[in-house]
Amino acid sequence: MSIGAHAPGWEWYYIGLYFFFGGVSAGAYFIGSLAEFFGGARHRGISRTAFYIAFPTLLVTPPLLIGDLGQPLRFWHLLFDARSGFPYVNFSSPMSVGSWALVLYGAMTLLSFLDNLVSEGKIDSAPFARLYSRFPRKLYAAVGSAAGFFIAGYTGVLLNVTARPLWALTDPLVGALFTVSAGSTGAAAIFLVMTWRRVHPAAELEEFERFDRIVKVLEIALAIGIVIAAGKYAGVLFRGPYAVMFWGGAIFLGTMVPLTANWYAHLAGRHARSEAVAVLMACLVLFGGLLLRISLVQAGQL
Amino acid sequence: MPKGMFVDTTVCIGCKACQVACKQWNGLPGDPGDFREDPAEKIPVAVNFTGNSYDNTADLTGTNWRHVMFIEQFPENRSGGRWLISSDSCKHCNDAGCLNACPTGAIVRTDLGNVVVRQDVCIGCKYCLPSCPFGVVSFSHLTGTARKCTLCDDRIHNNLGTACAKACPTGSIAYGEVADLKKRADARLARLKSLGHDKANLYGYKEAGGLNVFYLFLDSPTVYGQPERPVVPQGRLVLSSAVTVAGALAVGAAALVAFRERGQVEPGEEEVGK
Amino acid sequence: MGSNMAECHPVAFRWPLQAKTGHGAVLMHVDPRFTRTSALCDVHVAIRAGSDIAFLGGLIRHVLGSERWNKDPFFREYAVNFTNAATLVSPDYKDTEDLDGVFSGLSPDGKKYDNASWAYQREKPPAPPAGKPATLSDLLLRKVPGRPKTDPSLSNPRCVLQVVRRHYARYTPEMVERVCGCSKEGFLQVANTLLENSGREKTSNITYAVGWTQHTVGVQIIRTAAMLQALLGNIGRPGGGVLALRGHATIQGSTDIATLYHSLPGYLNMPDARKAHDTLKEFVVMEAAPVATSFWGNYPKFAVSYLKAQFGEAATEANDYGYDYHPKITGDHSHMPMFIAIAEGKIKGLLVMGQNPAVGGQNARYQRKALAKLDWLVVRDFFETETAAFWRNSPEVRSGELVPKDIKTEVFFLPAAALPEMEGTFTNTQRLVQAHDKAVDPPDEARSDTWFTYHLGKLLKPMYKDTADPRGWAIRNLTWEYEPEPREVAAWRVKDEPSAYKILKEINGYTVADGKPLPTFAALKEDGSTACGAWIYGGIIPEEGKNRAASRKGDAWISPGWGFAWPGNRHIMYNRASADAGGRPWSERKKLVYWDPNADSGTKDPKGNPVPGKWVAPSGEGIDFQVTKPPAFRGKDLALGFDGLSGNDAFIMRGDGKAWLFAPSGLVDGPLPTHYEPYESPVRNPLYAQQSNPVAKVWKVEGNPYHKTADPQFPIVLSTYRLTEHHLSGTMSRWLPWLAELMPELFCEISPELAGEKGIRNGEYVTIRTARGEVQARALVTRRMRPFRVDGKVVHQVGLPWHWGWQGSAHGDVVNNLTPLVGDPNVSIHEGKVLTCDIKAGKRGGGAQHA
């Protein structure tokens, strides 16, 4: 007999996708904020792009989360007590704290997004602009980053702090993995948008790649650690569709290939860097990040 | 004083009256997943034969809140063979994984110690499902919410016992004050041990902060499909969060290293943005 | 044995379990399968289906040869005083040991026994009384035989004990192992446990159900157990006895009030046109004379009062109380031959109430096809049962064998009320009658069977008003007045439900003159002044308005204030035997009924002084004996009923007042149970040349082929049985989703050894086949089934629960498609518990094995 903790029955097109978009948004915002804080004028392009990415990618997520609910119209119970109407939080539940973090993070990314629009003159309204310049940009970047970190990593903690064997055994690594992956996918997203907007001096590219070299190693180390920690439950990651997604998609295409291209370009010098390849690599990183989350969330439900 | 149930599996005859009484009292239908419609007669026909001994229920679900399991232990020569039978339901843990995980406060503990999912509050996020180490709470597509045994919350708050205890013909399921039930259970265990059942054990005195619905087993809990050492997963929250924060700091450090100002602007580069 | 109490009587099973957990009673289960009962018992011994008499006979031999039985004086004392162990049997008697498996008296064609050679040796009959006989009782008195001759030393080779000893001499533990396929050690464990737990201080009980009854030797199996318990001194004592677990709720009541074709209410015999039953006198004398020196000596009172209850005022002494118009049977009208008659077109119409022969009938295909021969069929039930639907979607219709438009049967399906929708009584397994109230009206036009029968009678009676046919007399004059009092129906929508009280009162009995209920059956008379539907229920309504079946005072033991246990609220029958010959309790611990020499008997001597001494039962238990008869009393030689019985004749329903180890009469297939193989068996009888019961009821008709013994085509033993989750043919359970999902599909329990041989995998389809038909089932491969080693060869056994049909929410093939029409010769019960078959992997008709 073996009956264990039940699988929640989360669909990949709701929850897996949410983890992905949340991670991209948070990662991008974080990098953008760092660029805002520590970067010079040269990094304004990065932070501007990041703040353009963060809010829209985040906006995708509430429909995904609400769609997965059995009682979608009651989603507001996540924030307010159903009977009394008072704000509610359950600190032992990552989902509960995460709901508030999403609200806070969402507010901050919205502010940053609007700030971009005002700065670039896309919103004409002068009073609006004045209102904006009142709030210190760095303040909400800071708050947003902290909340963003939470968004990036809490979903992994959410999985780890359950009794599903794959998720329980891989505790406490999945949160860290998702955070690191968020950084990686966020960076890739920023790079892609900058390329699309044609604001990509070579120097930024090099910084992205430097960032990626570090982060990808962390990712691989954490992924290996997770597989080892899963022990006999790692089987779901070695057989079936999620094995392909995890090893083929997340590890190989999403991590090893970009990392290899990265080192190759780094060692071969700047002249060997091709924009097309870099774009492809960024796409693979994003694709890999998506499959990483889907495979871990779905394989844990088998 | 908390109320609960003592399940003495050594007198369970596997009749499943508890399963049916539970469904009747709680107005639960046959599990939708068990039925297909007969095209000729237009009525639902049960198709859930499992081949697993006499257990066709297989698991607790959103519509099966009680489940009788059958474990056949027969050596090839049949000597000393036995058929262990046990009914199972929510344990109403004193430290409940489902309650800890619920993000809306839908899952609460009443004044009698039982844990209930408030059906008007639950949003059906399903996070409680993987949070129960015993695999109890389940999602019901019929209501769009998480559902499980309520310890007959309405009955026990009106001085009645649980429906399953009332229906049980042999008294295998007994409802009452947990403290009193434990005395009975201790006596039963002592008697079984004196008769030579050295693997007999009481399950639920220490597990998950103490289970208000606890069991007398003749063999290790894993034989009965229960985790030997169940862990309330929220206990890992602090460490998990800490390591995640460390991960975040690592990403931060990587970004700082990667995106630092490299001195003067290189010739040929243009400023972007502002 | 012969039962699965935990699964089929789960509520009652809590009592044996309490005995086990509370004070260490040992529970033993001897059964072909390891069931949910076995799971809760201390000991399980597996025996081959149909070998129960070999096992029980082995127990008898072991007990009689044991040191304990021979040394502890209790056993001999009980045997000599309370059983016919000392009685001498006719010198003409020849045992199965002499005739290699048959008894003396078998007809040349081997189909019928004449039991003359089984009779007791008797003294000369007493001189008849002077004068002409005036009453039926007077007639019976003139037939009183001489007392049986006895040898209390039990040494005469013709005494019953020695005859029994010799009969079972070859039922050694080795033979038991050889015939039953169980281990010697297992057998001896059961035997010694029984022996150790019988005696003065302890008693043991044997409980059985249809695992024993549904055999061609069904009655004899039960007899063996009764003999064993009598030898162990367990009868009439608390914690002892033989308990029959009746099947349906209130089936005990069903046989009490005689839905059986061959008996009248209260277990009177049915007048039979084949016998010398032409007049009431002949009927009573023929049926009662053999038993008149027992309490059955009151037969005339029972019979006349019954006729008065049936025909009321029209029944007078002048017309023999209507006896001439009372229906008489002309043969075996039990279920199986009835369906053969239907198949042969001899029966035009059938009323089926709460029964489902399309699934529950033996050789179900035969029975379903027979239904198509009727002119009309009325089915009353809650759901459209397979019987009600046979004409449109049975397997025979689906296969084209029967074509609906060619079936001329007019089928009426009437909705029946469910249990809570009617008032009445239940009589359950231990003869306990409990009243139950109506809780709610039936929906729409559903009505109870009582309502239906009553109103059918009301419609029929006027139709026979002017008929010249003498048979019309009976219907015209049937007492049929059960209109409800207004207060009985005030709360209900259905206003014309007959009065359950009036019906019960008629069953209880009343004085004709004033209609007052009779307080006990002792008040019955044979002069037509009393009427009584069923004498055994006498006293259930002791006075107007008081229904003892409705009383609800319980206690921890006998609970005399709870319901009414017929007869006379006696819970343990023959409880005189709970005291020794002198009337003293066998032990303080097992005290139940005993003689108190100082208690006021309530009678007075000629001088008017109170006579001391009576039987007492402090627990409130009804005393199954004449309360004032002293233990030393010697019954009169020329007497009927109680007067002829002595102070230690505890078994008051037997002519000699003793428990019958040897049955000189009453059973058509022998005075002693003998191991016969089931009618279909894979092995030759290891004990005798006679293979199976020589007088078993068989019907060699087309469509009912039997398998030969050890037929290589059908080498596997098949047993059919029930589960807790479903009820019989599934008419009440397969329509409920809650139950359908517990046991959704027909499955076959197979041992891994057999599964391995046949390439059968758990959960996949198998087909089981006999000469009567084929069914497919899911394979449940389990070690709870096992192969047996019988007479040196391996015999496999499979099992099929038979609840499934094609209607409702749980579908499966009809298992009874496999069984033949064959039955016990005493009571015509079908042999459903054991037959032979073959099994193979794959679906019926050769489909693939996987589900």
Image (cartoon, rainbow, N blue to C red):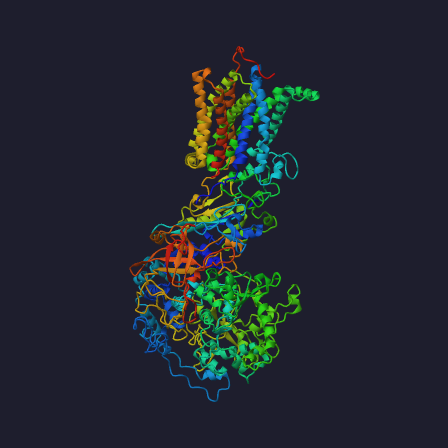
**Pick the front one: C390 or C480:** C390
Question: Where residue C215 appears, x then y in whole percent?
Answer: 40, 66
Along the horizontal axis of the image, is C364 left or right of C511?
left
B10 above or below C390? above
Q: Is residue C131 visible?
A: yes
**Pick the front one: C632 or C344:** C344
Question: Where residue A146 appears, x then y in whole percent?
Answer: 57, 25
Question: Where residue C259 appears, x then y in whole percent?
Answer: 50, 70
Residue pictured at 44% horizontal, 20% vertical: A263
Along the horizontal axis of the image, is C580 left or right of C740?
left
A293 above or below C263? above
**Pick the front one: B16 or C643:** B16
Which quarter of the picture shows residue C36? Answer: bottom left
Along the horizontal axis of the image, is C453 left or right of C80?
right
C769 above or below C153? above
Quick one: which residue is furthest to the right in this view? A127
Q: Is residue C292 visible?
A: no
C317 above or below B121? below
Which quarter of the picture shows residue C227? Answer: bottom left
Q: Quadrant of the N terminus of chain A?
A: top left
Question: Where residue C359 appears, x then y in whole percent?
Answer: 47, 62
Which quarter of the picture shows residue C183? Answer: bottom left
- Tally of numbered tags: 0
